[in-house]
Amino acid sequence: MSAVDVRNVSKHYGAVTALDRVSLAFPNGSFFALLGPSGSGKTTLLRALAGFVEPDEGMIFIDDQDVAHIPSFRRNIGMVFQNYALFPHMSVFDNVAFGLTVRRLPRAEVRQRVTKILELVRLDGLDRRKPRELSGGQQQRVALARALVTEPRVLLLDEPLGALDKKLRQDMQGELKRIQRTVGITTVFVTHDQEEALTLSDHIAIIDEGRLIQVGEPGDVYDRPHTRFAANFLGDANFLSGSVRDSGIMVDRLGYIATTSPLPAGEATIAVRPERIRLMAPDTATQDNRIEGRVAERVFSGASLTYTVDTDAGPLRVLRQNADGDVIDIGDRVALVWLADHSVVVED
Amino acid sequence: MRIETRRRWAIAWLTGPAYLWLAVTIFLPLSAMLYFSFQKKGPFGKHASEFSLKHYEAFFTKGYLQDLMWRSLEMGFHVTGLCILIGFPAAYWLARRIRGRWREALFLLIVLPFWSNALVRVFSWTIVLRPDGVLDRAVQSVIPGLPAIDLTDSYPAIIIGLVHSYLPYMILTCFLSLQAIDESLLEAARSLGARSWTILVRIILPLAVPGLAAGSILIFVPVIGSFFEPRLLGGPKGTVIGTVIEEQFTVVSNWPLGGALSFILLAIVLLILAVAAPVLKNHMRTT
Ligand SMILES: Nc1ncnc2c1ncn2[C@@H]1O[C@H](COP(=O)(O)OP(=O)(O)OP(=O)(O)O)[C@@H](O)[C@H]1O
Ligand SMILES: [Mg+2]
């Protein structure tokens, strides 16, 4: 059963189409990432779930209930805003307790639940502080605790880690994952950071210009991107285009590239991830796809090296683990080899 | 430390003129008045300067002066209270509900009274409030046969005139603090289950306290010292401490008494601010 079901939702702002007939089902207990470039409509979709944006068309179901006429304050959602939106005049305790006191729960229960959730986000002892006396990471935790303490049906996070520096961000990613797993809450999570989407979520939806491009588990979306955009946005990709022949394409000046994906008739584009290409000596014989080229550029990034190889069909990027410390010199001739399985046919 | 001394000189040079200006425009006249308030007689006529506390004593011995002071304070509370009751909702409406061009137009309407002469404004009210005046006729045309409305020379007339004059301060200060409230705070509250009323009481009002406080001070202080609105709109009933002080200077030429009463008024204002300050400070610290 899906906790949240979005059916054919559209939203227009004047001439701008923020959401274009989006249909998405968020499974119960899933950690769902909405990934897309700036302005693609991620926030709009999240706000539509929260009830801050009214869709022009389509329907949203939370627990199989149409929420069109249910205002935000009765939707039983928890939301964490990009700027945290902590109440500046209240202490950490009062911030977290807000959702409970609004529901008029007895004082003792409020205290007990706030204490428990502050422990969960590892903020015990800071409950008397004011938000501005906290670091960015701590504010983030307060926002999370405040959203979780009411035990909402869905947790909505709008780029919750966007304002943190890289190290803290990685720590908080771990924390977020741990907390989500502990609570087991269905979580929808907006980000434009593909790495964050891959590490945190168990489902990814890629959105571009208000349209849903692809949904699936991170591994599937990464290995089998449907479009050139998806291939490029989630990870890096090399593209080769040519006319379809047998189970592969003929690329101009390069020759035949085989694939195992189903092919359309006529022209097709194939995507190959840089790390799926192996660099070999120029005369290596192989059954796999093989192109020759000359190393044009080498970028060192610690654990790995990225080579740009000039081929007859233009430059291709190859990622190579820095496992044995070997490097290939610029100007060397190499063979680029990859499996037909790793040639993914994408739509343009 | 050479740099330290250089810095001090620079600060003195930069801030000096401002302090000098303050000294000339505020401190000098005020200290002259303080001096007179402790004199037996005013600066007119040929008599030696003679120290005396009798004008301060007068306030504490003459009951009617205390009554008038009390009346002025009461007037200050009434006007400030009404300005909050009208000004806060108006500012809220302007800050949170109105967007774009309309807001500018409404702002113009609000500050318009500032551009007209205060006396003209007050006289206009006398026309509106007198029997068979604008208000009376308007009411009669809606409910005919009602007894004539005559607010001439009455306390309500004074209050109406003062509220009209000072309301813009409250609207502007409240507008500023309401505008500064981040929309996402309200959305956060709503997502946590709060309805509009709860959001108003628990989020918006507390965050607007600095604006309410600033507006209240800007209104309360001049209102308790006001004199021509009470006189023109209240007539014989419009005697307050402000009119008495003004008469000491313009009619009876008793500068020392006028000065003494002014400083007592000032002391009361400072006392009220001192009582309110810790509460406000505590609040400001948290926001
Ligand atoms: N209230 C609004 N009024 C007018 N246009 C809006 C409004 N909100 C969003 N838009 C437009 O809708 C589109 C989608 O915006 P949205 O905020 O959903 O993007 P986003 O994917 O969250 O981007 P980002 O990653 O930059 O936050 C944008 O073109 C934006 O300009
Ligand atoms: Mg956004």
Image: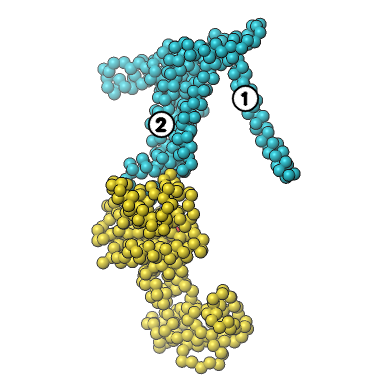
Chain colours: A yellow, B cyan
Quadrant in which the N terminus of chain A appears: bottom left
| Location of residue B144 in the rendering, given as x and y in whole percent from the top left corner | 27, 19
Q: Is residue B275 visible?
A: yes
In the rendered image, the residue lying farthest to the front is A125
| Location of residue B46 in the rendering, given as x and y in whole percent from the top left corner | 66, 6
Q: Which of the two marks, 1 or 2, is nearer to us in this view?
A: 1
- Callout 1 amino acid: Phe
**Residue at 47% over, 85% down:** A338
In which quadrant of the rendered view does residue A222 lie?
Answer: bottom left
**Residue at 36% over, 53% down:** A115
Question: Mark 1 — residue?
Answer: B27
Q: Give the structural element (helix, strand or loop) at label 2.
A: helix
Question: Mark 2 — residue?
Answer: B84
Q: Nearer the viewer, residue B86 or A344?
A: B86
Q: Give the structural element (helix, strand or loop) at label 1.
A: helix
Comes first in the chain, label 1 or label 2? 1
**Residue at 36% over, 40% down:** B201
CB at disc 1 and ligand 1 closer than 8 Å: no
Q: Is residue B146 above or below residue A267?
A: above
- Callout 2 amino acid: Ile
In which quadrant of the rendered view does residue B199 lie?
Answer: top left
Asked if marks 1 and 2 fall on the same chain, the answer is: yes
